[in-house]
Image: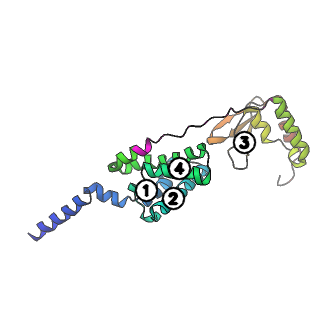
């Protein structure tokens, strides 16, 4: 009889906590989910770039500060139920009002939050209704400006001016020449490219650009002439 009463008491406590899913949800608190989102989802599974990690980190840093100010709750005590669609909307509006961010930055912060809750939906199916309302939040519309590209004459004029202003860089082929020949976006924070040259009907660089996409870039004749002259130059030790 004593064992039977103990089992009934344990079952009652489990039902009050929401059953097995309630006990599992208790272990998967918001801080635990947030850590798993960064370490497992972003870094191990998706292998996002360091720039994306920094952007998502800044988003949740601002969100945790806003939650602490609004709810008077520290990050380790914050629960997933407290981060609902009205709170996220208030957070995004606060970014626009207090920090003066643009609609593009607002949408970027919303993308990071939606990515986290899309990950949380597989870990917490009992919170599907709350997560569905948050994932349904629309992005803010804004006027997209027309992007104008430089003409070949403008590219030549800018390249010539920079070569005259910088003697050190004029002695070597500039990645701007390669990038302008195929409109490649730089992948590094300093605006440079990662390129390897191989011979296939002339000089063809294999460029790793934005999004870690690799491509073989066809070069125009002036750029090929500059690269050939640079490769024929004598190399110093350690150069």
Q: Residues within 10 Å of mark 2 (few under 14, many from 20)?
A: many
For the residues labelled 2 and 3, say whether their Cβ atoms are less than 8 Å apart: no
Marks 2 and 1: which is nearer the front? Answer: 2
Span colored in magenta: 133-151
Looking at the picture, the colour scheme in use is rainbow
Residue 96 among magenta residues = no
Residue where numbered disc 4 is placed: 92
- C-alpha distance separating marks 2 and 3: 43 Å
- Give the residue at the far left of this rendering: 1
Q: Could you say whether the residue bearing mark 3 is in a helix, strand or loop?
A: strand
- SS for tag 1? helix
Q: Position of residue 16 (x, y in %)?
A: 23, 60
Please give left or right for residue 171 compared with residue 104 in the image. Answer: right
Q: Which residue is the site of mark 2?
A: 66
Residue identified by numbered label 3: 195
| Mark 3 / mark 4, whichever is N-terminal | 4
> In this rendering, does residue 232 appear at all?
no
Q: Dot 1 corresponds to which residue?
A: 33
| Residue at x 35% of width, y 45% of height | 129
**Can you tell which of label 3 and label 4 is closer to the viewer?**
4
């Amino acid at each position: 009889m004593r064992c039977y009463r103990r089992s009934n008491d344990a079952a009652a406590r489990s039902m009050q906590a929401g059953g097995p899913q309630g006990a599992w949800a208790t272990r998967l608190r918001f801080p635990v989910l947030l850590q798993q989102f960064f370490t497992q989802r972003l870094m191990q599974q998706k292998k996002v770039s360091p720039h994306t990690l920094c952007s998502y980190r800044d988003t949740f840093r601002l969100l945790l500060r806003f939650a602490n100010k609004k709810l008077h709750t520290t990050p380790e005590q914050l629960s997933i139920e407290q981060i609902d669609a009205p709170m996220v909307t208030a957070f995004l509006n606060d970014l626009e009002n207090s920090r003066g961010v643009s609609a593009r930055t607002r949408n970027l912060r919303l993308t990071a939050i939606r990515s986290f809750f899309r990950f949380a939906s597989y870990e917490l199916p009992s919170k599907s209704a709350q997560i569905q309302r948050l994932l349904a939040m629309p992005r803010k519309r804004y006027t997209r400006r027309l992007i104008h590209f430089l003409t070949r004459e403008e590219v030549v004029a800018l390249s010539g001016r920079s070569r005259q202003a910088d003697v050190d860089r004029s002695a070597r082929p500039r990645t701007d020449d390669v990038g302008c020949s195929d409109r490649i976006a730089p992948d590094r924070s300093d605006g440079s490219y990662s390129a390897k040259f191989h011979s296939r009907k002339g000089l063809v660089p294999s460029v790793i650009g934005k999004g870690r996409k690799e491509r073989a870039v066809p070069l125009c004749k002036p750029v090929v002439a500059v690269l050939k002259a640079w490769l024929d130059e004598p190399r110093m030790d350690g150069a």
